[in-house]
Amino acid sequence: MLGSSSVTAMKKVVQQLWLEAGLNHVKVSQAAADLKQFCLQNAQHDSLLTGVSSSTNAFRPRKVCSFL
C-alpha cells in the first residue's frame, strides 16, 4: 500500500495537472509576434534604448565640492 505522504503528493500532482489543463494555450509564433509588437510599441520608453538624461540619472557620478 501507498503511504499517506505518497497519496498526498499524488493528489497535489493531479490538482496541478487539472490546473494546467484549464489554461489557455497560445502558439509560440503568436506569443513571439505579440512580444515583438509590445517591444516596438514601448521602445520609446525603454531607458536601455533611448538612454537616461543626466538630470534624472540617479547613478551619475557626484560632483566633488572643494573649498579653496
Image (cartoon, rainbow, N blue to C red):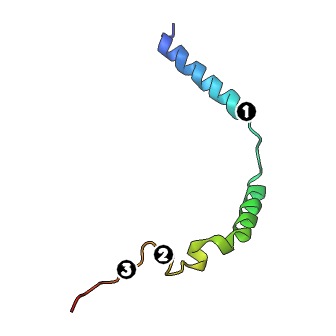
- Quadrant position of the C terminus in the picture: bottom left
Q: Residue at x 78, y 57 (%)?
A: 30
**Residue type (three-letter) at the residue carrying disc 3:** Pro
Give the mark toward the camera: 1 or 2: 2
Q: Residue at x 49, y 10 (%)?
A: 4
Query: Is label 2 in a helix, a strand or a loop?
Result: loop
Earlier residue among tags 1 and 2: 1
| Nearest the eye: 35 or 2 | 35
| Nearest the eye: 48 or 14 | 48
**Residue type (three-letter) at the residue carrying disc 1:** Ala
| Nearest the eye: 58 or 27 | 58
Q: Position of residue 47 (x, y in %)?
A: 57, 73
Q: Which residue is mark 2?
A: 57
Query: Is label 1 in a helix, a strand or a loop?
Result: helix
Q: Position of residue 24 (x, y in %)?
A: 77, 41
- Using the image, determine if residue 55 lies above or below residue 7: below
Left or right, 4 with respect to 31, comes to: left
- Using the image, determine if residue 55 lies above or below residue 1: below
**Residue type (three-letter) at the residue carrying disc 2:** Asn
Earlier residue among tags 3 and 1: 1
Cα distance, mark 3 to mark 1?
52 Å
Q: Which residue is mark 3?
A: 61
Q: Residue furthest bottom?
A: 68
Q: Position of residue 41 (x, y in %)?
A: 74, 69
Cα distance, mark 2 to mark 3?
9 Å
Q: Residue at x 76, y 58 (%)?
A: 29
Numbered label attached to residue 21: 1
